[in-house]
Amino acid sequence: MPAGVIALRLPGAPSLEVTNLDVVSGSRRTGEKAVAIELAHRFEQISAKAYEHPADRAATSALHSVPLLDKVIKRLSDLGHERRLRQMVMGNAVHLGTDQVPDVWTRYVQCTSILDLDSVPDLYMINNPTVNAMAIGAKTPIVVVNSSLIGSYSPDEIQTVLGHELGHVLSEHNYYSTALLLLKQFMEGALPKSLLLGLPIRGLYFALLEWSRAAELSCDRAAALVMGDPLAPCRVLMRLAGGAVPGMSLESFLKQAAAYDDEDDLFSRHTRFWAELSLTHPIAVRRVKELTLWVQSGDYDRIRAGNYPRRGHEPPPSAEFNAAVAHYGERFSKFLDRTAGNVQDLGKQLGGWLKKWQTDGTSGEGGDEEGGS
């Protein structure tokens, strides 16, 4: 093998050496080193609608229907707070690439190739004992992984998580994910109180949390497609739930997921609702259950066979989808009603906040705008 070429081999699969490959990194093209990319199933021009969970699609559409919400999120980004967030990550993390943890980088590039992404988002590793990863950036997405994941999980488990995060990128979840993170920082006192004065912060936060839990179900599917194995994300979820303990059985965990869902009396539903209300991710066993139901429906095999919608050719929404949008719209309205009154009052609050920042947004906190970047 030529010097400087990084090879990735998986059991039972051939390896392809690429000797003069330009690696796309964000909006930049770098040709620092040749990279060997594993021959894998590539889903050419796959649309995120191919794998998105119905709850995710419906919740995202319901968010779009919240009066002026998208304009508020865009304005938050324009005020420079997303830029601050990116600077914090870039200044306190390690930028991975061909010369920095190259094995992880190679698997990451492979994931982007399988999902046929137009570019490779920058990948950062941050020192954190919690096993986690995230895709953020409303304008230019980046993926951040915690060092505990890279240091203690197997290469296949790491790639499963990377595939999951790139599913967020393809679905453009990072737009609302960044807003959720900014709202969380505001509620924790990390952002000035004057920034969001007059907005129903808690209602917006819980509405975005509800959306976030639905979005995770989609990206578990994306991870299954990337790995070519629906059990791969199930194994990772089992480990996230129970830790790395010898003797754990995936088969038993799958049975546990089915048993959890079977406890569907009123008390159980009430308990689950309050347990999940403040979580960004659904409970692990529910995620496993949802993933196995998707595989059993035949959609996973149909996508693997090439029968999936391409970007720009997505099918129109169905009546069932419209009903789901109405369901999430009602849930979001309840969150917002408790903090903002009715929808008309909410629209007035969001509109008033936008007007405030249009008139004096260039002073104070608004002086850090990203206009020139």
Image: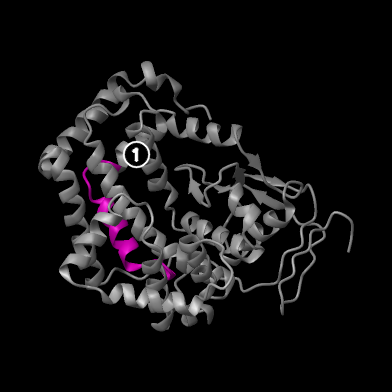
Local crowd at mark 1 within 10 Å, few (<14), some, or many (≥20)? some
Residue 179 position, x and y percent, is: 37, 41
- Residue matched to label 1: 73
Q: Seen in the image, is 267 located left or right of residue 237? A: left
- In the image, 219 versus 261, the foreground residue is 261
| Depth order, front residue of 371/234 | 234
From the viewer's side, name the closer residue of 15 and 258: 258
| Snapshot quadrant of residue 153 | bottom right
Residue sitting nearer the eye, 114 or 7: 7
Please identify the residue farthest to the right as the structure is shown.
2
Residue type highlighted by circle 1 = Ile
In what quadrant of the picture does the N terminus appear?
A: bottom right
Q: Give the residue drawn at x 48%, y 67%.
A: 238
**Residue 316 visible, this orientation:** yes
Left or right of 303? Residue 152 is right
Q: Is residue 193 above or below residue 215?
A: above
Residue 102, percent from left and from top: 74, 53
Q: How many marks?
A: 1
Q: Position of residue 85 (x, y in %)?
A: 48, 34
Residue 10 place in picture, x, y as percent: 71, 72
SS label for mark 1: helix
Q: How is the image coloured?
A: one colour
- The answer to whether 328 is drawn above or below residue 207 in the figure is below
The residue depicted at 36 percent of the width and 43 percent of the height is 180
The overriding secondary structure of the stretch rendered in magenta is helix
Q: Give me the residue at 74% from left, 65% from top.
A: 8
Question: Is residue 50 one of those drawn in magenta?
Answer: yes
